[in-house]
Each structure stands twice: as C-alpha cells, then as structure tokens.
Image (cartoon, rainbow, N blue to C red):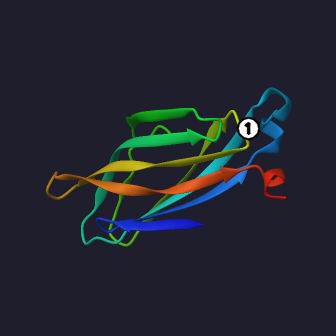
Amino acid sequence: MISKISEGITISVETYYQPDYSNPVNSEYMFAYRITIENNNSFPVKLLRRHWYINDSNGSNREVEGEGVVGVQPQINPGESYQYVSGCNLRSEIGKMHGTYLMENINTKKTFQAIIPAFEMCAPFKLN
C-alpha cells in the first residue's frame, strides 16, 4: 500500500491486477485500485473533482479529469474516511498513476488540492 499526507488528507492506494478482465494476447491489461481518503483536519471536507495522470509503459500518457469519484462527491467529516474501488485499463503489463483531488473545506468554502501518490500497476507475471 502507498500512502501520502497533504493538506491534512491521507490518501492510501492498493492495486490489484484483474486477470479475468485482461487479454494479454490483445495487449489489454485491467487493474483495480482501492483508494482510502482520511480526513485528519478539524473541519469536514467534500471531494469535488479528480485529476489523474496515467502513464503506460508502452509510452502512452493520458489525463482523466472530472467531478467526484465513482459518481459521487463524498463529504468526509473530521477523523473519518471514505473508500472506493475503481479501475484502469492499460495496453502494457506495467503502468503508473498519480494525481490530485480538489477538496473543499465545507466550513469556509475554500478549496485545496490533496495529492494522490504515484502508484504502480504491474501484472504479476512481469515480476518474475
């Protein structure tokens, strides 16, 4: 698990290769990732937007930006956490993702960015 704390928000990431949804013969590799977002601040926050940078080891790079995560904009109260699972498809066995969440201090309506740490996605058979 990879974790990073920024602006009082701890973001932890776990990745999983999805062999049942992958097709290596056609260069299709599917990965799932579980993100836990913990609010260590004294105020509630709302996750407004996400901005991902996805790097595939075949040299392709993508950016994904949009509202919330998995269709919601969760509110996270002080001392609480929010967890979700999502996925990423790659054209090679190895890749990397990182990015930011645009968060809002619900009390003051001020926004700030929480950093999503870089994490690797690697098909297990590549590790041998």
Task: Name the residue rendered at 50%, 55% in the picture.
Answer: 118
Looking at the picture, how far across and down is residue 16, in whole percent?
70, 53
Task: Name the residue rendered at 53%, 47% in the picture.
Answer: 97
Looking at the picture, how far across and down is residue 20, in whole percent?
83, 40
Q: Determine which quarter of the picture holds residue 51.
A: top left
Say what amino acid the circle numbered 1 marks: Tyr
The image shows residue 78, relative to residue 100, as above or below, that is below
Looking at the picture, how far across and down is residue 56, in whole percent?
61, 39
Front position in the image: 97 or 109: 97
Q: Determine which quarter of the picture holds residue 95.
A: top right
- The answer to whether residue 76 is left or right of residue 69 is left
Dot 1 surroundings within 10 Å: few (below 14), some, or many (20 or more)? Answer: many
Position of the N terminus by quadrant: bottom right
Position of the C terminus by quadrant: bottom right
Looking at the picture, how far across and down is residue 21, in whole percent?
78, 36
As helix, strand or loop, the secondary structure at mark 1 comes to strand
How many numbered marks, from 0 up? 1
The image shows residue 65, relative to residue 44, as above or below, that is above
Q: Determine which quarter of the picture holds residue 120.
A: bottom right
Q: Residue furthest top?
A: 26
The residue beneath circle 1 is 29
Task: Name the residue rendered at 31%, 69% in the picture.
Answer: 8
Q: Residue furthest left?
A: 108
- The answer to whether residue 90 is left or right of residue 45 is right
Task: Name the residue rendered at 57%, 32% in the picture.
Answer: 60
